[in-house]
Image (spheres, grey):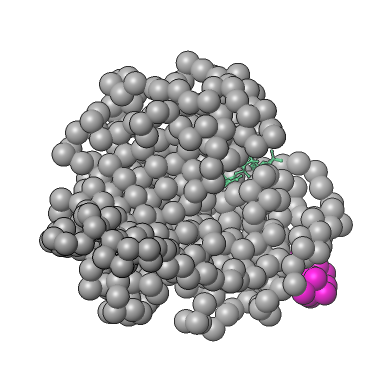
Amino acid sequence: MSRKREPQSVSLLILGAGGDLTRRLLIPGLASLLSEHEYDVQVIGAAREERTDAEWRALIRDSFSQVTHPENADRYLESARYITGDVTDAAHLRTLLEACDHTPVIYFALPPAVTVTVCAALRKVELPEGTRLALEKPFGTDLRSARALNRVIAQLVPEEQVFRIDHFLGMSMVLNILGLRFANQFFESVWDARRIERVEIIYDELLGLEGRGGYYDHAGALVDMLQSHLLEVLALVAMEQPPRLNEVELRSNAAQVLRATHVWDDDPVASSRRARYTAGKVGDRRLPSYADEEGVDPALNTETLAQITLEVDTARWRGVPFVLRSGKALGQYVTQVRVHMRPVPEIPGFGGAPEPDSIMLDLKSGAVELGVTMNGSGDPFGLERSMLVAKKEPGHLLPYGQVLQGIVEGDPLLSVRADMAEECWRIVAPVLRAWKKNEVPLEEYAAGSLGPKGW
Ligand code: NDP
């Protein structure tokens, strides 16, 4: 990031250090950060499972072997420690904090229910000055529980020391939305309801459950993806230009968008669709039907593909549908913001009506594609569709590395503020209620297909 604060020395205390998140995302993200930047970070792992310091250090070293400067690992390994125990116990939490050589960053890589218990236990513990808390999604399970958790957290540390993680906000390609919109004349001048007809924000995955059925079956695509990640992307697409790129201005403008956002026509039944996959082949991998996956209770009717249409009720956006969609086990990997412009009137004498322009931002590769109409190459008075494509080189920092950089530097710019987390639940609440009452049919699609017909 170009806007740097003074990095401080921190002790990153990972609660739930034996879990999937720690192994697959957190430690690799940390290695990508510490490979590129010199910070003073002590890495402490904590969980109930017995493990030695040497095993913990080996996990860290292994992640460093994947990054550009593996030799940097040595700086961090000596102080790295693993401490066994139950982190819901206040006395054990005190022991963990005493093991911290620097300002603690308590990272909750725990099941959400355990996070709530630990937050309550922390009230019995005196936290060192400046302690930061990093909380994973899902942040609560509905508006009420998110509010309750926010209240508990507010009693522990001030809001600027709380980092609600949304690793989408750590994806440099997602942050591209800001540069593209605010550092060019082209885009901002057409970025409103007069010129734009519809916006789609899509995250279609090839992956199925990957062994995480137990978690996913209680979340589903709506909570797992739309309620958190895609609404944060919507906020970046729709926000007013912040006067300064700092945590107060950017997050205030994002929160303003979320406050103005509601289900289209306030009709959750007409504005949402849901489906789940049946057996099929994704590439050369055969997937069983979702209902037959390990850890799944078919009676929960959990969706693996969700779509909702929203309106951002501001002067800039009123009347423009924002369609959010995400699904698993689909036949195409699509991570895009698609902006569809309104059609221009037909010019008599030109061959046919011009196709409306479009702007596509690829959230994974950072490519931007403009769909434009120009004179035909064969018939010069005919019209032809062309694509203007801009490509970007990916950076070295993994999304979790970017997010961790903010935490190490004490900069909450890329973390979700308390009110934003609550607004996200408020927006999807009517849809969740309608789905619970089965007012929206649960459709089906074969794994590896493009979803149910007509989506
Ligand atoms: P796991 O279930 O894999 O790991 C949870 C960890 O918590 C385990 O190490 C477990 O170890 C520990 N734990 C559970 N109860 C206690 C306890 N009472 N005291 C101490 N440790 C405990 O979960 P994940 O790693 O998958 O997820 C962690 C968080 O990250 C969740 O909130 C999840 O939603 C979020 N997340 C996960 C992602 C992923 O891809 N995995 C992606 C984005 C967010 P032990 O039993 O040894 O104590």
Residue at (71% x, 51% y) in the render: 23
Q: In the figure, is residue 371 to the left or right of 321? A: right
Q: Is residue 407 visible?
A: no
- Residue 82 percent location from the top left of the image: 76, 55
Residue at (40% x, 59% y) in the render: 360
Outermost residue to the top = 299
- The answer to if 74 sits in the magenta stretch is yes
Residue at (27% x, 55% y) in the render: 355
Q: Quadrant of residue 104?
A: bottom right
- Which is more toward the observer, 267 or 325? 325
Outermost residue to the right = 54
- Residue 118 percent location from the top left of the image: 54, 46
Q: Which residues are magenta?
A: 69-81
Q: Is residue 295 above or below residue 15?
A: above
Q: Is residue 318 above or below residue 179?
A: above
Q: Quadrant of residue 191?
A: bottom left
- Residue 220 percent location from the top left of the image: 46, 33
Residue at (58% x, 56% y) in the render: 107
- Which is more toward the observer, 325 or 415? 325
Q: Is residue 72 visible?
A: yes
Q: In the figure, is residue 199 to the left or right of 34? A: left
